[in-house]
Image: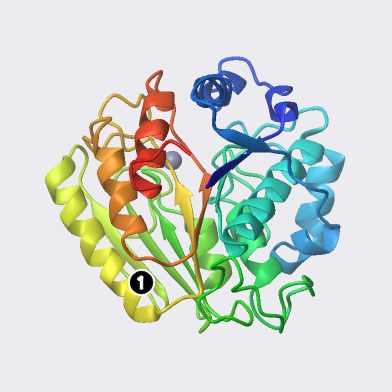
Amino acid sequence: MIKIIFSKRCLEYESPGHPESPKRVKIIYDFLKSKRYKFIEPEECNEKDILFVHSQELLNKVKQGNFFDPDTPSLPKIYEYAKLSVEDAIKAMQVSLEGDIGFSIMRPPGHHANRDSLGGFCYFNNIAIAIEHFVGTNSICAKFVGEPFSAKGGCASGTRVRRAAILDIDCHHGNGTQDIFLGRKDVLYVSLHRFAAFYPGTGGKSIKNAINYPLKFGIGESEYLATLENALKGIKKFNPSIIGVSVGFDTYKFDPIGGLGLEISSYRKIGTLISELNIPTFYVLEGGYSDDLPKCVLEFLLGINKHKIL
Ligand SMILES: [Zn+2]
């Protein structure tokens, strides 16, 4: 069953005129609610979780609002909202480890946040923190370390999360996520993104454990899906216990920021291809700014859940 992780509190902050607005998530929430999806709230995360990925300096900066970035503005209580989004990603991963499908639709997004720096609408790297929460020797989630959780079909290893893959299908390269895990043997980063003269300008080629597929503006569905199939082969070969997907819908052809020429119906095909790997997978929302966002998300959900609503 798909469980959508969401808290209405993420709709409380706004920077006038900013494309990463409460509206974009509210329209997803309202639409999925009308389709009777099951929603759950995140649980509190520990500051230590954030520090597994980010420096104390960045944490302090966000906490004190002591920074200036026009794309990633310092807003009242932004630390609380950024932390809530982290908690949502952790909860999404936990849900998928327990045998359901966790999907976080929270904001702010995270994949541009690096160890020491925020940027590109991202304060903390939600998906990276979730992965670090459960993977490797740093894990503080005793519940999952060394204990079997295969009873409900959870992790493929049957004991603990040993290896994780991140698939980043946002239109932008997840420079933060790539850098955070660069050189790690237990984490693979794979990204499909628009490249050349496009933010953040990284991801032109693969490096170490970061497999990058730079794509031209407006390439369209058939080339995109062929590239995705190739990317998924690499993930299968890596044999991860779990996959975390940075899901962006700014690859949609009418997205005002991104644009890789995808149709609304393309997202069901993308979701289906990911689900065919038959590896536990959780999903964390990154970008997507068009008014058709709810329809794109629904198609994607139908794909990952083999065409069933719930
Ligand atoms: Zn994006």
What residue is drawn where x is 49% and y is 24%?
35
Tell me if 275 is positioned left or right of 264 in this view.
right
Compare residues 155 and 186 and report the one nearer the observer. 155
What residue is drawn where x is 70% and y is 36%?
68
Q: Secondary structure at mark 1?
A: helix
Compare residues 222 and 259 and report the one nearer the observer. 222
Dividing the picture into quadrants, the one containing residue 253 is: top left
The residue at the far left in this view is 222
Dividing the picture into quadrants, the one containing residue 72 is: top right
Tell me if 37 is positioned left or right of 302 in this view.
right
Label 1 lies in ligand 1 vicinity (Cβ under 8 Å):
no
- Image vertical order of residue 43 relative to residue 153, above or below: above
Q: Is residue 194 visible?
A: no
Q: Is residue 50 visible?
A: yes
Q: Amino acid at mark 1?
A: Ile
Compare residues 157 and 58 and report the one nearer the observer. 157
- How many numbered marks does the figure carry? 1
Where does the image place residue 210, in percent across and percent down from the top left?
Answer: 40, 71
The residue at the far top in this view is 16
Where does the image place residue 130, in percent across and percent down from the top left?
Answer: 65, 60
For ligand 1, which image quadrant applies?
Answer: top left
Compare residues 12 and 294 and report the one nearer the observer. 294
Image coloring type: rainbow
What residue is drawn where x is 67% and y is 21%?
14
What residue is drawn where x is 56% and y is 19%?
30
Residue where numbered disc 1 is placed: 235
Where does the image place residue 63, in percent across and percent down from the top left?
Answer: 84, 44
